[in-house]
Image: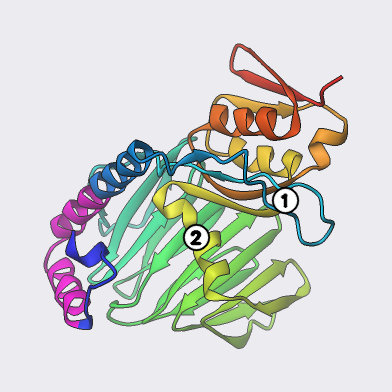
Amino acid sequence: MRIESAGATADDHAALAAWLSQSPRHEGAYIRAQAIWYALASEAVESTGEAGLQADRPVRYPATGRRGLLAAAGLGAILLAGRSIPFQRQSSRRIQTNVGEMRRIALTEGASVLMNTASTIEISDDRNLPVVSVTAGEAFFDLVHAIGAMTVNLGWASVQGGGAAFSVEVAGRTGQLLVAQGHVNLRMGAARSSTTIQGGHSIFLQTDEPPQIRKISPSDIESRLAWRTGSIVFSGETVAQAAAMMNRYNRVRIHVEPGSLGEEPVIGRFSVNDPHGFARAAVQLYGATMRQVGDRIELASHP
């Protein structure tokens, strides 16, 4: 796939954008091609022995000097809708993804939203432009080639952008906004005063509190958005925290028993749909014990 290679030119990307804008079916075909590409790439890495746990090369956790957990898992595919779902003009539409499912919806010409696992959005129509409300979970909005600005609501805040790419995550009365490209206008509070957020910034949002804005690097953006290709990247989270993040994507749940294991750091990239691979890495690097009872993987420190 030429566009996925390092040698892809600006003309290649422009040609792809033009082709995608011609029909929602083109975007669906591109998604399917990407899934095949990632699967083949994963198999190629595994066949050369470059993937999987690298127990003989532990990564040091820079903050504490403790051992790090490093795994390079293949980009296993999670359930992805086989085609883009075109936005149908109607008063309101509610869309949900199940655990382990991602779904892409074409909103308007040149605009789409990719929903992460266990997420809910509502789409309504305002002056012939869709308005999307993210009520639970996470969604990535690709509006780089959109015609006109669109509004994304979080309940207590709203984001308006055109020519931008950003993700929104909602958990109760808090949220996260990550602007990967372009810029957006953020409105919060009763006055709905507007703040312009440039690309390369992450914002923590909380009801009745001013937004907490911080600049993030391109590599951090890639890590935060790795879920779009079926990966999850850890950069020092504890085993307990990482297990909770893995559990978002799987019906087989990882339970970390109280003890020192839960405080060990995790550094590396995993496939979101491979809880067993994550558990085996903890066993091999930290001497943990592992057993599975039904849909539950139990991890504990070695006695």
Q: Where is residue 266 in the image (x, y as percent from the top left)?
A: 69, 47
Q: Residue at x 54, y 31 (%)?
A: 277
Mark 1 vs mark 2: give the one in front.
Answer: 1
Q: Nearer the viewer, residue 274 or 163?
A: 274
Residue annotated with mark 2: 225
At label 1, which amino acid type do we have? Glu
Q: Earlier in the sequence, mark 1 or mark 2?
A: 2
Write the start and end of the magenta stretch as one range. Answer: 11-34
Q: Is residue 216 above or below residue 242?
A: below
Please rate how many residues cluster around mark 1, counting C-alpha atoms within 10 Å: few if below 14, some from 14 to 19, many from 20.
some
Amino acid type, callout 2: Leu
Q: Which mark is residue 237?
A: 1
Q: Residue 259: give x, y in percent of width and height.
A: 88, 31
Q: In which quadrant of the rendered view does residue 178 lie?
A: bottom right
Q: Pointer 2: residues within 10 angstroms few (<14), some, or many (20+)?
A: some
* Residue 49 belongs to magenta span: no
Q: Position of residue 199 (x, y in %)?
A: 51, 81
> In the rendered image of this protein, does residue 260 appear above or below residue 229?
above
**Total numbered circles:** 2
Question: Seen from this angle, which residue lies furthest front?
Answer: 56
User: Going by the image, does 181 lie left or right of 303?
Assistant: left
Identify which residue is drawn at 73% across, 76% down: 212
Q: Is mark 2 on a helix, strand or loop?
A: loop
Label 1 and label 2: CA atoms lie apart by 16 Å
In front here: 149 or 77? Answer: 77
- Image quarter of the C terminus: top right
Whether residue 256 sits left or right of residue 168 in the image: it is right
Q: Where is residue 41 in the image (x, y as percent from the top left)?
A: 30, 47
Q: In which quarter of the image is the N terminus?
A: bottom left
Residue at (59% x, 50% y) in the render: 268
